[in-house]
Amino acid sequence: QDISVAGFDGIEMGKHMSPRLSTVVQDAETMGATAAKTLVDRMNGAEKSDTKLIPTGLFLTESVIDIN
């Protein structure tokens, strides 16, 4: 009741912990595709690429204190 614990990347082990681990989840497929496109663009002469924002999700479970 005194601390909160959260993971990152939705590790499988977090689903089996007690209490279940809260986590930040990223879209790895989109991240990989964006990185590959950026690399190909750079190899083809692009000097700078635009910043890409890839959405993430925060999944709260019992491992995080409810501060409300």
Image (cartoon, rainbow, N blue to C red):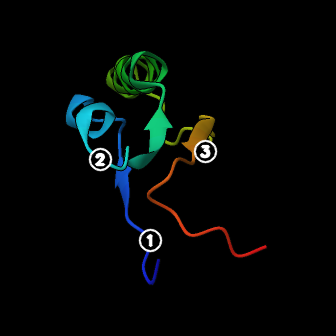
> What's the amino acid at mark 1?
Ser
* Residue found at x 43% / y 27%: 31
Which quarter shows the C terminus? bottom right
Q: Secondary structure at mark 1?
A: loop
As measured in the structure, the alpha-carbon distance from the residue carrying label 2 to the one carrying label 1 is 13 Å
Tag of residue 4:
1
Q: Nearer the viewer, mark 3 or mark 1?
A: 1
Give x and y (percent) for residue 4. 44, 71
**Picture disc at residue 18:** 2
**Image point 36% across, 50% down: which residue?**
19
- Residue 67 visible, this angle: yes
Q: In the rendered structure, which amino acid carries the disc numbered 3?
A: Thr
On screen, 40 above or below 59?
above
Residue 30, image x, y percentages? 48, 19
Q: Which mark is residue 51?
A: 3
The residue mark sitting in front, 2 or 1, is 2
Is 11 positioned to the left or the right of 19 in the image? Answer: left
Between the C-alphas of marks 3 and 1, the distance is 32 Å
Residue 59: % across, % down: 56, 41
